[in-house]
Image (cartoon, grey):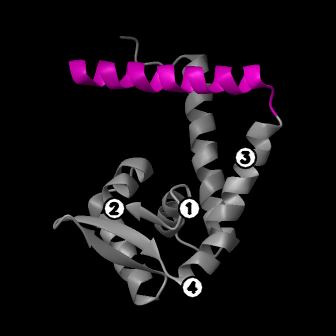
């Protein structure tokens, strides 16, 4: 192993970092923390509520970060937790939460859809296929370690 990153991998990592920074800037423009925007985003992609486990899986955030953000959002009257089947929980938006989400996460989703919608079907398929392939290959390689 040479210890050097290939030129392509450097470009790839830079793009990931810049994309993450762009989403962070979006959260700041909306006056939200990254975790709050990610929670609202996950809920909006699911309707007005979302299973807590799905938020954990989809956001990539730690359970501690999610729980801290949920407690704050619950205290602010943005959402509430609903118990399902004893232990599982559903995260539900209040009216205030739906209003906040429509001015933040929904706008972000609309921007993303607009961008992807401007691409050809082939560009969309190529992007999604290669992104999935990289993720799957990465996960497999990490299982070997």
Tell me if label 1 and label 4 are in contact, CB under 8 Å.
Answer: no
- Vertically, is 23 above or below 34? above
Q: Which residues are magenta?
A: 119-145
Kindly indicate the quadrant of the structure image that contains residue 17: top right
Tell me if label 2 and label 3 are in contact, CB under 8 Å.
Answer: no
| Circle nearer the N terminus (1, 4) | 1
Task: Inspect this view and state whether residue 118 appears.
Answer: yes
Q: Which residue is mark 3?
A: 113
Crowd around label 3: few <14 · some 14–19 · many ≥20 (10 Å): few
For numbered disc 3, what is the local secondary structure? helix
Residue 136 position, x and y percent, is: 40, 23
Say which of 102 and 138 sits in front.
102
Residue drawn at x 35%, y 55% as measured from the top left: 56
- Vertically, is 31 above or below 114? below
Q: Which residue is mark 4?
A: 96
Residue drawn at x 59%, y 59% as measured from the top left: 24
Query: The C terminus is located in which quarter?
Result: top left
Q: CA distance from mark 4 to mark 2?
A: 19 Å
Crowd around label 4: few <14 · some 14–19 · many ≥20 (10 Å): few
For numbered disc 4, what is the local secondary structure? helix
| Circle nearer the N terminus (2, 3) | 2
Q: Which mark is residue 44?
A: 1
| Circle nearer the N terminus (3, 1) | 1
């Amino acid at each position: 192993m040479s210890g050097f990153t290939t030129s392509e991998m450097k470009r790839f990592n830079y793009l990931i970092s810049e994309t993450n920074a762009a989403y962070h800037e979006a959260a700041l423009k909306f006056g939200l923390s990254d975790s709050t925007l990610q929670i609202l985003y996950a809920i909006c992609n699911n309707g007005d509520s979302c299973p807590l486990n799905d938020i954990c899986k989809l956001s990539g955030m730690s359970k501690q970060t999610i729980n801290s953000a949920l407690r704050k959002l619950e205290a602010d009257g943005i959402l509430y937790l609903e118990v399902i089947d004893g232990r599982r929980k559903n995260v539900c938006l209040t009216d205030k939460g739906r209003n906040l989400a429509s001015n933040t996460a929904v706008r972000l989703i609309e921007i993303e859809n607009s961008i992807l919608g401007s691409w050809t079907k082939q560009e969309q398929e190529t992007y999604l296929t290669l992104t999935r392939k990289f993720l799957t290959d990465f996960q497999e390689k990490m299982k070997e370690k």
